[in-house]
Amino acid sequence: MNILGVWDGHDAGAALLINGRIVAAINEERLTRRKLEVRFPRQAIAACLEIGGLKPDAVQFVAACTSDIAKTLSRVLPSTKEAYYQVRRRKAAPGAWASLKRYAKYRMTEWPPNALSRAVSRWALARDLHRSGIANARLNIYDHHECHAAAAAYASGFATAVVITMDGVGDGRSASVSRFRDGRLDLLAFTPARCSPGVFFEHVTHLLNMRELEDEGKVMALSDYASPVEDDLNAMLPLLTAPELQFVTAMPASRLAAPLKKILWRFPNEQFALMAQRTLERACVDLVTHALQATGERRVALAGGIASNIKVNRRVRLLPGVEDVFVFPHMGDGGLAVGAAAIARADLGEEQPPLLESMALGPEYDRATIERALSTRQVRYRACENIGDAVADLVANERVVLWLQGRMEYGPRSLGQRSVLARPDRPALRDRLNLVLKRRVWYQPFCPSLLESEARRLLADFTGTANRHMTMAYMAAHEHRGALSGVINVDGSCRPQMVPDDDPGPFADLLRGLRARIGVGAVLNTSFNLHGSPLVCTPDEALDVFAACGADAIAVGPFLAMTDSGLTR
């Protein structure tokens, strides 16, 4: 069976399963070059089919997601979501009715699907699929939170687990608690959209003059720079709680902006962020605790936008009795296409091989294509017998190197296919990267990639299995913080990618080479893009960034290109 998963909302994308195995997954932003694309993922569908070697008419089953009233209207009138996209990304002015429109948007997204919205969504999706050449496939539309849960459960590798989804809104819900066993998901409880933890944090993000659905990680990072606020002084705590298996807000989440604005008037931005982070952590930990008590499970699988909050995830991992935590690596709505396809696979009774063996699920470019791109640029380049070892030399000598190898990553993290690399122990170089290349706020930390054996040595709170996908916070051991000083936050935390020591790929070669040269098998690894743009996909895009950003070198496939001046000069 050829199953195509499709998501046509925020961070639209597609995924292709052939005979139960995922062969491709891509988000539309990587191809249209519009960050967090909202339009129907025509290019992502075409790319998945090309990678899978299929014609559009070979797709037998399409698994889509979400049929609530707001989503259905956006399918019928795509201009509405485009208008919101332009304002949210600060590409257009909000206009005179911005506050009213914002309130109406939140109220409308609380409405669950009904028979009419399901029928209209089916019609609109069939229309868009037909335009992509997919006319005869069976089409199913699944529940938003069931898709999040399925992605986490089937990718976790757990035989049994409690599965928790937490996000803004989708199909009238904002969170769910399920039990996974015998290859099946059983829903235990859900939180209605009116009590959304995601909308609570969106309001906080917006009030701090950041972009909701995009900059929530900045709020989390900013919170580390606040002076402490005791719980009895934190007026946010009563606004979001989890007394049982549901989140509860003090009023409908759509109305939380007003009390939050009053709190912000009394506190500096850093403390406001800290209070919000503390409120979110406490509510999420309470929900997970109740779920563990209700099920007796010791493993937790997480998905949904809130699961991108690595400090929440760390608190869950360190709960008493928790044996392991898995966070679906594309935890936000951008991962819904995989979740929908996973449900379809189970519904069709297909074989259940591991859903996610690698996040390298995008396009790959052969040697001839790479060299053709290089030959059109005014750069010096050479082929290397071992590109990882060659780049380790440069990084050890404090050079900044751009890195494009193999298939593009699926999801928000750079995992050794499309990366910007530097030494992990140079705060000055980190700051220079932030200001000149990434052009981000100064308090946003970079992350390390490191060999698994190094993670066990360097991190003070390593528990569970190795985290391969940068989905969790850990604390660096005090005695090793100097070696990781360029990739830890002010509180000593970091978000590491742990690479198997025996991995045969070039990225592991690089880490082994750095261990031999600087004594630590770790590297600063940040996403290969300019600020506000998606991760690069093609060699040409990579070379465009190289020309614009001032890095010292670029490793594309087996080729290494150098510049005579760079960030470190």
Image (cartoon, rainbow, N blue to C red):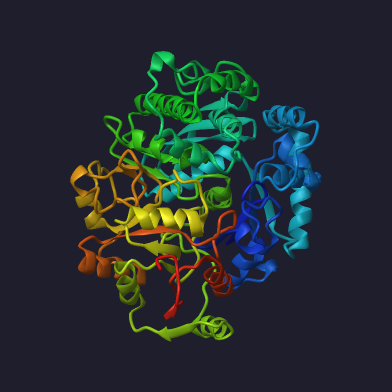
Residue drawn at the location 66% of the way across and 53% of the way down? 37
Query: As rendered, which of 175 and 478 lies closer to the eye?
Result: 478
Task: Tell me the quadrant of the picture where the C terminus can be found.
Answer: bottom left
Query: As rendered, which of 524 and 534 lies closer to the eye?
Result: 524
Query: As rendered, which of 513 and 108 lies closer to the eye?
Result: 513
Residue drawn at the location 41% of the way across and 25% of the way down? 282
Q: Residue furthest top?
A: 232
Is 82 left, or right, of 535 in this rendering? right
In x, y percent, where is residue 446? 40, 51
In x, y percent, where is residue 366? 51, 80
In x, y percent, where is residue 452? 26, 56
**Residue 463, quarter of the rendered image:** top left
Task: Tell me the quadrant of the picture where the N terminus can be found.
Answer: bottom right
Could you tell me how many numbered marks the image carries?
Answer: 0
In x, y percent, where is residue 460? 22, 42
Residue drawn at the location 43% of the way across and 33% of the way down? 223
Is 21 left, or right, of 395 in this rendering? right
- Residue 504 appears in the figure: no
| Vertical side of 484 occupied by 51: above or below | below
- Residue 56 appears in the figure: yes
